[in-house]
Image: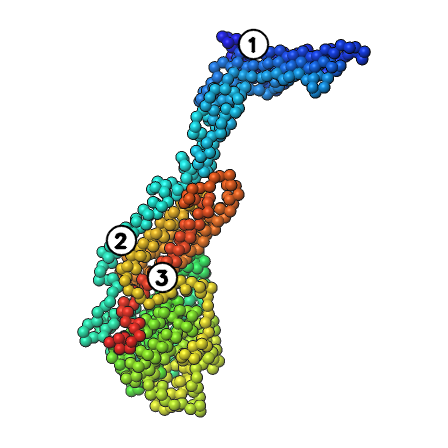
Amino acid sequence: MGSMDQPLSSLFVEGAVRADGESFAETVWQHKYSVSNDSSIAPGGGSGGTVLLFLHTLTLGESAILSSVGGYGSPKGGGGGGGGRIHFHWSDIPIGDLYHPIARVKGSIYSSGGFGRNESGCGENGTVTGKACPKGLYGTFCVECPVGTYKNVSGSDSSLCHPCPAWELPRRAIYTAVRGGIAETPCPYKCISSRYHMPHCHTALEELIYTFGGPWLFCCLLVGLLILLALVLSVARMKFVGVDELPGPAPTQHGSQIDHSFPFLESLNEVLETNRAEESQSHVHRMYFMGPNTFSEPWHLPHTPPEEIKEIVHEGAYNMFVDEINAIAAYQWWEGAIYTILSILAYPLAWSWQQWRRRMRLQQLREFVRSEYDHACLRSCRSRALYEGLKVSATSDLMLAYVDFFLGGDEKRPDLPPLLPQRFPMAIIFGGDGSYMAPFSLQNDNILTSLMSQSMPPTTWYRLVAGLNAQLRLVCRGQLRVTFQPVLRWLETHANPALRIYGVCIRLAWFQAAPNGYHQYGLLVSSVEEEREPVNTDGGVQAELLSSVKTTDMQNESGFLREVLLTQGHQSSEGFARRKRGYRRLIDTNSIQMLEEKREMFYLLSFIVHNTKPVGHQDLVGLVISMLLLGDFSLVLLTFLLLYSISLLDVFLVLFILPLGILLPFPAGINALFSHGPRRSAGLARFYALWNITSLVNVVVAFLCGYIHYKSQSSSSKWIPNLQPWNINMDESEWWIFPVGLVLCKLLQSPLINWYIANLEIQDRTLYSNDFDQFWQ
């Protein structure tokens, strides 16, 4: 049909186009032969004819037949006819972007040979051919080469479609079909996901790494940039904070023993600016609140007044005063609920919330005593009129509060207020609870300084307090039996030898035990004579220390142990024995093993974040912290780029479990480094340390996301060739590099933060001197 000059524009076949060879006796399609049994004639089948088509396009319907088969031979021995030839001579085959299919074949095309008497007698098959196809196309109907192959020569044989070079196909890429077939290499491809970027199908992280020359060069550039930025931060910190505020050895003035080594204590200059004489001359007694001021156990006062104030208060009115104080100090249920929720989501925020609510409670207590309460419990008319007989204060950590009782001036009692020797033995309770955020400390104030100055020079007392606080900050909750021992040794080697010349002795003791196991620790101050005074068993005083906190004779009606009484007068050994019996909780090297320690769930974290001795070199420590802080933030960003190559869900999981915990250490650290004042800087640095440890939860989530993805993809990605070394991506074994790097970075930051805080809080390293003379010089 058609001709080379006048080809058919299109051919539609719905019926049959046949050029079949003739079969014996009947047509091939009926498969019937009629030869007599006695006939010797055995004719063969005829060969198929030729179908030659000159055309542009062909459409062969579902029921259409294009046939050139050979005819069937005789069963008596005639062979089958050979198949014919069917040839398509395509005219103007479209190529490239203009390509469209030139044949739509749904029907059948036959060119087989006819059947003979047996299998050896079948005719040869015919041929179905087409014009040679241009580049990119193959086959009789000139279709596109399969995806992943190319054809750069003319012809119709399928072997001319060669596989594309494997080394030209990036990982995470698949070949794509091109209109008109692929005629040349490289073969076109696309990335398997929109998260990968052409032409190398790299993740966003890999794009960044290879933009700067590959992993090794990128690491070198990153480290250099971190060092440069850390130096810039250090210079900016010195300019912003000021050289005068940077910690360093504080020289003492000649002829003065003013100690500046502990920022939480008032310096002598500050103390001298206040008039302490008026308060100390009228001070009668300091009564400490019981409880650690938590949401589950708030501050509270005992209903029974101590012996020291029974002469200046009305007991009935005092009980009403205690009820009102305890009601104000108690927390609402929703405050504890918010704290519990924040503890689960972000513990540093829970700590901030707790401190804020503690501060509000202290402010309410002060306002109540200062202006709202009519001081009706006091016997002094002048104190009731001027509202000057009571004063509520607390330590800086807001864990220990106390009420000071003062004389009004109209009591006309010559024995009041008692002098320091008449107050012996006197209890001074430590603030804090031995935790990282609230270490034990002896809070000094004007009243305490004035009282102690009755027996010793103020400079000696200040040095003693500074040295004691330096030792107490190393005491760790959960390890009291071990960490209290250096404090006991320091009291025996440094404190008491210097105080004995003033007739004073101090001992470590615990006070105010609660049913939940919480204890208050502090000092028991007494005279040297009282400590040496022999006490017989008839007086009821036992020389050994109490081995258990569950002393039934010290319990009051509320179920708590009563506050240790600061008894007055010790003219007789019986009186001292009575007071001594109230303190049967001294701590020494023998009884310290009997302390009951309660270890919390996060006890192991105390080995990472804990208070240490100062190491000096604060500028260098700050520089290294700046480098690690910047490195931490850089690794966080790189980890997010890494997780983005998996899915956005993993990014959200890491970001919000715990909420923003992985991002907040950086601003917390910058805030700590650039804050003014050693005390504020130390507090913010502790807060930064909390965020640093809390963010490990987010890093663990990132690790789990990477591990799960790696395991799920390992089987499906076996067909993908291995990456080159250091080709960092989440599909390979290097997926753990950034999460592990973050863990190491945070673990390295922890001891540096501990040193940084120690350098801020202890600027005089002689406080830890083992030499007695060097400490007291």
Q: Is residue 29 visible?
A: no
Gap between marks 2 and 1, in whole Å? 87 Å
- Dividing the image into 4 quarters, which one contains the C terminus? bottom left
Q: Position of residue 456 (x, y in %)?
A: 26, 81
Q: Amino acid at mark 2?
A: Leu
- Residue furthest to the right: 38
Q: Secondary structure at mark 3?
A: helix
User: Which residue in the structure is indicated by mark 2?
Assistant: 231
Q: Amino acid at mark 1?
A: Met
Callouts 1 and 3 close, C-beta under 8 Å: no
Q: Quadrant of residue 357?
A: bottom left
Q: Is residue 526 visible?
A: yes
User: Which residue in the structure is indicated by mark 1?
Assistant: 1
Q: Residue at x 67, y 11 (%)?
A: 46
Q: Position of residue 471 (x, y in %)?
A: 34, 72
Q: Nearer the viewer, residue 210 or 403?
A: 210
- Residue furthest to the left: 254
Give the mark nearest the N terminus, 2 or 1.
Answer: 1
Q: What label sits on residue 220 in the rendered view?
A: none
Question: Viewed as shown, does residue 428 lie left or right of 261?
Answer: right
- How many marks are shown on the rendered structure? 3
Q: Nearer the viewer, residue 678 or 306?
A: 678
Give the mark nearest the N terminus, 3 or 2.
Answer: 2
User: Which residue in the structure is indicated by mark 3?
Assistant: 751
- Dividing the image into 4 quarters, which one contains the N terminus? top right
